[in-house]
Image: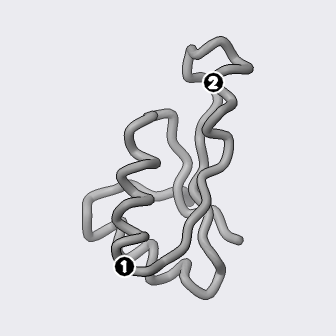
Amino acid sequence: MEEILRTNDPTLIPFASALLRAEDIECFAMDVHMSVMEGSIGILPRRLMVRRADAARAREILTDNDIELSD
């Protein structure tokens, strides 16, 4: 798995996941439930992971939809 997106925006991970799944790219959101642990203040970023084989295509799809990616 490779991280392609890291964000504190709670709406961005579901949107990016929907875009990728629409293109048959499996993805996995990590750290989504950490807000419960941190008190829901949004300090810890959420991450979106894809398979290495799909990473380049996933980055292209997200970039085409004006989503800024992790380095």
Q: Position of residue 30 (x, y in %)?
A: 66, 48
Q: Residue at x 71, y 71 (%)?
A: 1
Q: Could you say where residue 62 lies in the image, as x and y percent from the top left?
A: 36, 66
Above or below residue 51? Residue 30 is above
| Rendering quarter of residue 33 | top right
Find residue 35 and report its image quarter.
Answer: top right
Disc ID at residue 59: none
Establish if 51 lies above or below 47.
Answer: below
19 and 47: which is toward the camera: 19
| SS assignment at label 1 | loop
Q: Nearer the viewer, residue 11 or 43?
A: 11
Q: Which is nearer the N-term, disc 1 or disc 2?
A: 1
Compared to residue 34, the image places residue 51 above or below, namely below
The residue shown at (36%, 52%) is: 15
Q: How many marks?
A: 2
Taking the image as shown, residue 30 lies to the left or right of residue 48, namely: right
Query: Label 2 belongs to which residue?
Result: 35
Name the residue that disc number 1 marks.
23
Q: Judge the density around disc 2: few (<14), some (14-19), many (≥20) Cα neighbours within 10 Å.
A: some
Quadrant of image for the C terminus: bottom right
The answer to whether mark 1 and mark 2 are in CB contact below 8 A is: no
> Hey, what amino acid is under mark 1?
Glu
| Residue type marked 2 | Ser
Which is more toward the observer, 56 or 16?
Answer: 16
Question: SS class of the residue under badge 2?
Answer: helix
Q: Residues within 10 Å of mark 1 (few under 14, many from 20)?
A: few
Q: Position of residue 54 (x, y in %)?
A: 55, 83
User: Distance from label 1 to label 2 (Cα)?
Assistant: 29 Å
Q: Is residue 65 left or right of residue 62?
A: left
Query: Residue at the location (74% across, 20% down)?
Result: 37
Q: Hey, which quadrant is residue 26 in on the image?
A: bottom right
